[in-house]
Amino acid sequence: MGKQETDKDETTRITRRGFLKTMATIGGVGALSTANDSLGVEKFTGSPDRYGVLADLSLCVGCRSCEEACNEINNLAPPEAPFDDQSVFDETRRPEPNSWTPVNRYPNPKEENKPIFVKRQCMHCNEPACASVCLVGAFTKTREGAVIYNEDVCIGCRYCIAACPFYVPAYDYASPFYPKVRKCILCYEKRLAKNEPPACVEACPMEVMTFGKRKDLIKLAHKKILENPDKYVDHIYGEHEAGGTSWMYISPVPFEQLGFVTDISTTPYPEFTRGFLSAVPIVLIMWPALLIGFYMWSTRRDEIAEDERRSGHE
Amino acid sequence: MSNRTVEAYAVRSWIREKLFLGMTFQEYLKSLITPFNIIVACILCVGIPFYVWRYLHGLIAVMHPSHDYPWGLFICFGLLGIVPLSATGFIMASAVYLFGLKEYKPLVRMAILTGFLGYACAVAFIFTDIGRSWRLPYPMFISFGPQSVLFLVAWHVALYLSTQFVEFCPAIFEWLGVDRFRRWALVTTIGATIFGVILSTLHQSALGALFLIMPGKVHPLWYSPYIPVFFFVSSIWAGLSMIILVAWICTKAFRQRADDRFLNSLDNLTVGLGRAASITLFAYFAIKIIGVAHGHHWNLLATPYGWWFQLEIFGFVLLPCFLFAQGARYRNVALIRITSIIAVVGVMLNRLNLSLITFNWNLPHREYPKWTEYVVVITIFTGFILLFRWMVNRMPVLTEHPQYKDMH
């Protein structure tokens, strides 16, 4: 219970709205009296000082130092091939249980001998789909911006993996007793909570990534694009995708050519189920009323038929 | 005879009557050697080791370690496919107890048992699928994620499983011959039925609502803001078809367990159920078309996925709708029964299409369930068929208990 209390302080709208939904889902009646409180929550934009990372894809040379730093700080098993092995770029990799931030290589249509490298990891959504779908509340969007995971309550339903629009979380299928959902947590406990940048950012020799307050990074990205209109595509991936993310990219090549999910809505993903969930308390209250009505109607109909039969006989 | 011998005799005859169908243990064992049972034994001998393997070596032992398709057959067939087929209980109970269609009473217990075991089967599949099975009760007692649709599903499936158990209790108490409990259980009928309808409405639709958050992964022809309504409406015709089908199987497999009341009324009731299924299928077909129109997806109908979609809604929705109507009009019971198979396959096809076959349609690669998943699915399903048979053979499901005839 203590854990839950602290989560409540840290989370954005998820937990407060969650309280409402608890009432709605279990109690039904309780929800209506607190419904007005939720209106204030609708416009909540997240903790204003939360951190983020801006990755400039024009700078990455594919050295995979970030991957190595990530495996080290998170105690992930080392890969079969060493980190300086460039053959991994022959195929596209997605985040896996022991590889939270794979780097992929894509051809550069502008300069053929200078391919584009894209580091993937959790985007740390402002309103994460994974957190909203978790039936035990194992994910938390912290005040600092990281989306973190609590393995102590996770049952392993993998709805988070199905729901993530960025195809990020991965599951320990090979672990019989302690399987976990694995994904980047922005080095939350070891670094971010102490206001330090994640390990990958610090390990990068090319300074591809800039760590800072998300609102400042957006300004920085716009400034870079404005000052170098020929160098960058006029788009900050992550500014609006899925309602905005803490991790953002700018790129010299259109994002759809770099394996990014681009058919993604700007709507925060929890919104997609909000309508359904708000109908739940209505059904809980109206159905019994209707059904009791039907029941009374059908028994009354039988009574009338019985009466008529009797009076007909007399 | 001493008291002890009398007691021992009473226990032995009780076991013989209640468990061994009035035979001695040796006779009972002998009666079990049938072709059907031999097939079942083979299935279990192959399947159970795989099941044990899954718990010793993790999920990877029976399924692909896929991060793009986290849900395989256990969820897409075992939960999403079986739950609509288990709508039998709430449909029959509400028809008889709430809407006053009392002529359907002979089918109520069979429908509730089908529903109850269907849900138990779905829970068994969830138990198998989740990474840490032993944490299944966590969303109820330990940690709450009430903003999740799955949280609602978990609570409602658990509550509905319990509700159906209560609804089936009179049969169990009649079998055990405990009259006091039976009367107490009957008092709850109306309340349990209403509660069951609420829970069913919400979780049948919630299973569809699980996918509302995946607009980029579910194919646009299957994705719609109306998914919850589609799932609920299809659960009604699926449940009706399942009642027709299970009743038909019961007349073949358990004829000696059914009384005249059941056997004599069944043709009429099958026709009535077929008519109801036809109407709901038509309504479902109409809202599916509205779903396509609402999403402006007409152009997608002429793509390979579109042909597949058309096969589903014409071959497995409109066709059974038409055949049910024909069967009801000409009182062709055989046609209605055959059609119920098409409809049952149809609802499962819909769930598998949405959650597995066309899922991640825009990814460059496709993944399909590993063969071992089929083995485990068949094993679990077989287990529940055995349980169904065990209960129908012993409890008054297809018959009124002679002691309680004409009582409510």
Image (spheres, rainbow, N blue to C red):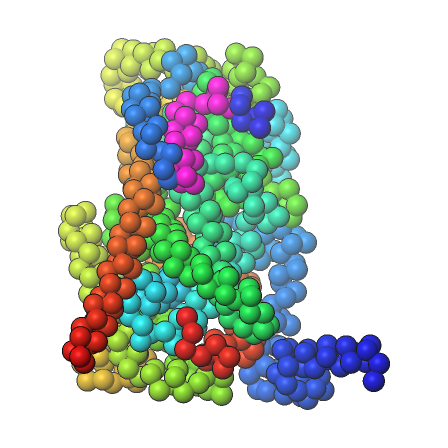
Q: Residue at point 24% right, 63% down?
A: A300
Task: From the viewer's side, name the closer residue of B105 and B161.
Answer: B105
Q: Which residues are magenta?
A: A7-27
**Residue name at image x 61 percent, y 24 percent:** A73
User: Which residue is nearer to you in this view: B103 or A166?
Assistant: B103
Res B30 seen here: yes
User: Does B254 appear above or below B80?
Assistant: below
Q: Position of A175 compared to B149: left or right? A: right
Reply above or below: B140 against A227.
below
Q: Position of residue A136 (x, y in %)?
A: 51, 38
Q: Position of residue A182 (x, y in %)?
A: 54, 36
Quadrant containing the N terminus of chain A is top right
Q: Nearer the viewer, residue A84 or B115?
A: B115
Quarter of the figure with residue B250: bottom left
Query: In screen coordinates, is B157 left or right of B330?
Result: right
Residue A66 lies, in percent from the top left, at 53, 24
* Quadrant occupied by the C terminus of chain A: bottom left
Main SS, magenta residues: helix
Residue A20, magenta (yes or no): yes
Instruction: Identify the residue at horizontal 49%, vertical 88% (top origin).
Output: B256
Q: Which residue is drawn at the image coordinates 44% and 16% (left, top)?
A: A51
Q: Residue lying farthest right?
A: B2
Question: Was residue B103 drawn as part of the magenta stretch in this picture?
Answer: no
